[in-house]
Image: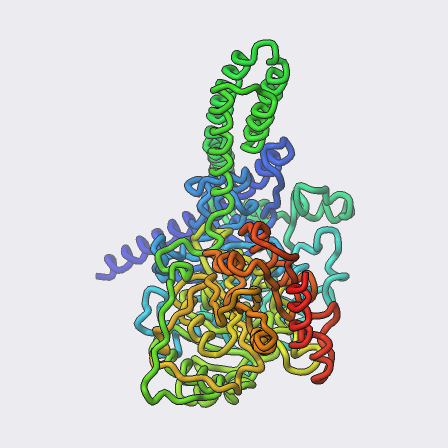
Amino acid sequence: MEITSTQEWMVNEKLSYENFRAEVLNDYRLVCESRETSLLGRKEVLTGKAKFGIFGDGKELAQVAAAKFFKPGDFLTGYYRDQTFAFATGVATVQEFFAQLYADPNEAHDPHSAGRQMNSHFASPLIGADGEFLDQVNRKNITSGMAPTAAQVPRALGLALASKMFRNEPRLKKFNHLSNNGNEIAFCTTGDASTSEGHFWETVNAAGVMQVPIAFFVWDDGYGISVPKHVQTTKGSISEAMKGLQRENGTNGIDIYKVKAWDYAGMCEVFEAGIQKIRDTHVPALFHVEEVTQPQGHSTSGSHERYKTPERLTWEREWDGNKKMREWILENELAAEDELNDIELAAKEMVRESKARAWDAFFKPIQEQVTRTHALLDRMIEASGEESEALQVIKQKLAINREPIRKDVLSTLHAACIASPACSAKDEANAYFNELKTEGYKYYGSHLYSEAPNSPLLVEGTELEFAPDAPMLNGYEVLNRYFDTLFANNDKVFAFGEDLGKIGDVNQGFAGLQAKHGENRIFDSGIRELAIMGQGIGMSIRGLKPIAEIQYLDYLVYGLQPLTDDAATLHWRSKGRQAAPIIVRTRGHRLEGIWHSGSPMALMLASLRGLHICVPRNMVQALGMYNTVLGGNDPAIIVECLNGYRLKEKLPSNLLEYKVPLGVPEIVREGYDVTLVSYGSTLRIVLEAAEVLEKIGISCEVIDVQTLLPFDRYHKILDSLKKTNRIAFIDEDVPGGATAYMYNKVMEEQGGYRWLDVAPRTISGQHHRPSYGSDGDYFSKPNMEQIVDEIRFMMQE
């Protein structure tokens, strides 16, 4: 028995050693492949095949080490230098990297963004074609990257908070395709210079307060483009600057670790223990990865020799992580030099072949377009006779272009159709031009909103139902009854914001609901709008339905960046692979004072394409909009009327079934002399004006647009204009704001100008912010007398 036991021990030791050796050499293969990808990627940009490149060279070893502990179910919210992490996890291939570098719009070639994002912006599939969330537990998940510095950080809060909710909320246990009891970690990576952004500080502080499982990785290469870190960060070190957040016994906070980017064994040891602690305890941690090198500089747009000293450049060559790993392998006799040489040569060959396949796949359809265009031009030239010289020049310009793109083909066809006399070949060329144009706009413009069967845009709406004894309640009480019913029936819904939990929000829509439904589902947040939006975005990416509150519409600006760059674009930039169906609840209009009564609708319209912007006039209408957007995967913002919370409304009996269709205006008063178009709080003033005008013989048709995005999809406003031949657009935004947007939609897009008897009007707020007090409100925003007088002038023209 002793001999057998010894033999087994020797065999096991040998197997353990062989497994360890194989793992190390596989990691070395990965860092070599990723480095070669960066080197060849830069060449493709400099030779003109790609537009721009930014690469992860110098970070390979640290990312391979971190990826070793990234398990199925985990989420990465990273940035544009995380190519090695993506390769190591198997979420992306080198060929896909080059397809993205070439901006290949075919999602079979670039499944991460279909040519819509620059290189290293990876996205794993999270949503199926049916609009349902896929199994996230048994795959490694990467959320779609973004270029703005630190923009990826806020969503980490929500990705991690979801794990906390899945672990602590019993009602979520049944959703085992979305979480394995909350064991998932949000890996959040960023460059050191980006830690200077408020996004980073706000998120880290919130994570320390909330104790959610985030692993922050900071790749510290000493610079933010050309600016050294002593100019960026207090004490020149993010880990030193953050020591006050270090968690101690009896406190919340974060754990802080420091490692060297060239120390493979040291990083593996620290990462393994630190990440397991996060997984077990949900205590967030910062991993400050120091002494990162950047062999090719910041990007293809410049050279780092301009700002790095010769000494620094020499040090970077000596302490390059790939070089140090090679030395470590040889020193520990894990492989001979010949074996490493073979790995390096195989990596070069693999990357070259991947690049070539990606280029061929990208360029072949363009070559086919060029070939067909040349054939069309030949027929046009033949039909043109003596007038063919201009066409010959156009054809030659395309022929000498060695690497044309789709734009070049379209420009050639367009120029040829203009230069050619009428002939059947010209008609064919024009048809082909329109075909390619349609295809191109579909390639780059689809999926701004959900195109799945559960899209909110497919909801037709339902009728209100009332019990015979339905009570008349204050608007906030209607909302309270609705939210109570919603939380009792939809386990995925959560709500949070400033003053939302304990006191039930400043207008009492959630009064008493935290005590009834629990602090896990309805809770307070600190005054950190950006982080609130981030936690809502991250939770929604993981399949939950967060209602994230911005207490007043004026403070939307604090949380705007994550909404405009992340939530609004996610479905589009991943071409439907991912979505962030966050619902932003806010309130605005007509309170008192500059920062509690604003109406920044033009700001929202310009920056939130990809969200639905809902502007209900009362709380019953608001709950119908909540129901509509909750059923799909599109993000939305619902602006409740501040002056509507204490207006009486009849309580519907179909609180959860009532749905308001998006982009379908409602005629709230019929008339035949003039059409008045408005929404939200202003609508009540418009209705008051219509009453006055009725008494002097002017009949007003008043239309509530209900939603600004989308806007009047079926041209109901145009139908009204055809009847009245006069129209005015009225809202509280600044001149040229949302009134101009509505004017453009109806006059230009719908062709409303054809039906006008007099010039249309826009009646808006003043150029300045609303002044304090009721008189300030009167002279800052549209008032009833102003509307009455403007309509009287219109009738006199």
Model colouring: rainbow
Residue in view at x 59 percent, y 61 percent: 727
Q: From this viewpoint, which residue is outermost toward the front?
A: 697
Asked if residue 157 shows in the view, the reply is no
Quadrant of res 388: top right
Quadrant of res 74: bottom left
From the viewer's perspective, is residue 97 above or below residue 743? Answer: above
Depth order, front residue of 71/668: 668
Depth order, front residue of 193/27: 193
Image x and y of residue 583, in percent:
48, 69
From the viewer's perspective, is residue 211 above or below residue 395? Answer: below
Quadrant of res 276: bottom left
How many circles with numbers are drawn on the protein? 0
The quadrant of the picture occupied by the C terminus is: bottom right
Residue in view at x 67 percent, y 47 percent: 298
Depth order, front residue of 6/381: 381
Image x and y of residue 467, in percent:
32, 84
Image x and y of residue 722, in percent:
52, 56
Asked if residue 147 shows in the view, the reply is yes
Q: From this viewpoint, which residue is outermost toward the top?
A: 386
From the viewer's perspective, is residue 375 above or below residue 235? Answer: above
Instruction: Tell whether 54 sits left or right of 441.
Output: right
Image x and y of residue 382, in percent:
52, 11
Depth order, front residue of 26/791: 791
